[in-house]
């Protein structure tokens, strides 16, 4: 819907009541590891010139969680797109409808040079794609039916235009307000004894990126200044448009532009990491079950990728022994050597109380207590 772009009068200026409208890894059972864990299967994939292995409890192509997670980012991209349009839309010309003709309607005979005003408005339309319009009226002609000039301008916009690409100005003049019985709009005419004029702008929503608050405030200030200097309405409007048009649509960097760029980079990076879109993760999605005996280490798996029982020889360096244990996936028998040979001092079978103990210490024989009369 159209909204006010502000206005001014011989007694002051004001802003529009509503210048711009508002544009307003979760948990899962999936697990991966470089080492075996219960319920996992062994996979292999090729990345950067070599084969990599990992364990997972789910096929790399079975998880739909990543696809669902991508949908989560759509609102963020939409919001960033709206911000970007607002930030950079001021440099994009609106598409002009061939039926959108410039309107100049002088109902009170104050525009002496309509052709000059038209040329200024046409240059503005050519530069921006926004179609301007100028209507003049007497205060008495609308005051009985509308509470303010802004209300009247809003109504005129809806009656005259069916799009959001126009910028309408309504200019009014009044005579001696003391002689008018109609209630006076106190926003424009706080002193009813002084003859006065006023203007109000009304812009469509599609013009917002170009007709920013900064642009419209500057335009209103220029127009009001020329009118206060006693310039005729036609020359004042021509001057204001001629001053503003050349400065529009020119790219100028501002700190506020960094916000959508930073947000876009952050969201994209977050999505790539969370959804597994890195080169390594994309390569891992092509992983297949590792064939039996393939890969690093001595762990062997069965046809389903699970570790299977095996008879292995294991050297620990702490003696030679043989035992059997159950790891939950079958029984295995291991033999290991302590690396010290048959030395009884270091053998795991060393018996401190047996006959293989080190030589006994030299014994000292003491006289035994004998019978009476013997020493």
Image (spheres, rainbow, N blue to C red):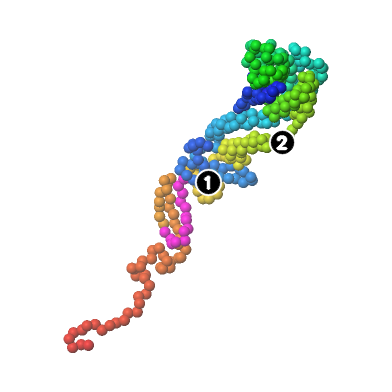
Q: Main secondary structure of the magenta part?
A: loop
Asked which quadrant contains residue 185, the reply is: top right
On the question of residue 286 being in view, the answer is no
Neighbours of disc 2 within 10 Å: few (<14), some (14-19), many (20+): few
- Secondary element under disc 1, as helix, strand or loop, is loop
Residue 172 percent coordinates (x, y)? 71, 16
Residue at x 68% of width, y 25% of height: 13
Q: Which mark is residue 34?
A: 1
Say whether residue 334 is left or right of residue 7. Answer: left
Asked which quadrant contains residue 283, the reply is: top right
Q: Which residues are magenta?
A: 307-321
Residue at x 56% of width, y 39% of height: 288
| Quadrant in which the N terminus is drawn | top right
Say whether residue 154 is left or right of residue 345. Answer: right
Relative to 225, does residue 142 appear above or below in the rendering? above
Say whether residue 371 is left or right of residue 211. Answer: left
């Amino acid at each position: 819907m159209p909204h006010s772009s502000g206005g001014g009068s011989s007694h002051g200026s004001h802003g529009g009541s509503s210048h711009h409208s508002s544009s307003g890894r979760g948990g899962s059972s999936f697990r991966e590891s470089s080492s075996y864990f219960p319920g996992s299967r062994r996979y292999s994939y090729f990345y950067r010139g070599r084969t990599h292995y990992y364990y997972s409890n789910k096929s790399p192509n079975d998880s739909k969680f990543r696809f669902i997670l991508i949908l989560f980012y759509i609102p963020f991209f939409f919001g960033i797109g709206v911000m970007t349009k607002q930030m950079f839309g001021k440099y994009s010309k609106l598409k002009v409808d061939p039926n959108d003709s410039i309107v100049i309607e002088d109902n009170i005979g104050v525009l002496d040079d309509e052709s000059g005003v038209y040329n200024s408005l046409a240059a503005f339309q050519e530069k921006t794609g926004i179609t301007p319009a100028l209507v003049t009226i007497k205060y008495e002609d609308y005051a009985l039916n509308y509470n303010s000039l802004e209300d009247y301008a809003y109504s005129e916009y809806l009656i005259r235009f069916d799009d959001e690409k126009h910028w309408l100005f309504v200019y009014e003049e009044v005579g001696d307000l003391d002689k008018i019985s109609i209630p006076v709009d106190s926003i424009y005419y706080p002193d009813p004894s002084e003859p006065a004029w006023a203007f109000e702008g009304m812009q469509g929503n599609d013009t917002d990126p170009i007709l920013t608050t900064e642009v419209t405030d500057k335009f209103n200030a220029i127009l009001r200044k020329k009118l206060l200097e006693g310039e005729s309405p036609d020359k004042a409007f021509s001057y204001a448009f001629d001053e503003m048009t050349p400065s529009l649509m020119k790219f100028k960097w501002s700190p506020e532009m960094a916000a959508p760029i930073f947000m876009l980079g952050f969201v994209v990076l977050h999505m790539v990491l969370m959804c597994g879109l890195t080169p390594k993760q994309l390569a891992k999605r092509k992983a297949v079950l590792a064939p039996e005996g393939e890969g690093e280490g001595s762990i062997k798996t069965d046809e389903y990728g699970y570790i299977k029982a095996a008879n292995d020889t294991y050297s620990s360096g702490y003696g030679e022994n043989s035992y059997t244990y159950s790891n939950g996936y079958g029984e295995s028998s291991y033999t290991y050597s302590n690396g010290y040979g048959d030395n009884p001092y270091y053998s795991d079978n060393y018996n401190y109380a047996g006959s293989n103990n080190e030589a006994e210490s030299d014994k000292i024989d003491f006289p035994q207590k004998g019978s009476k009369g013997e020493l």
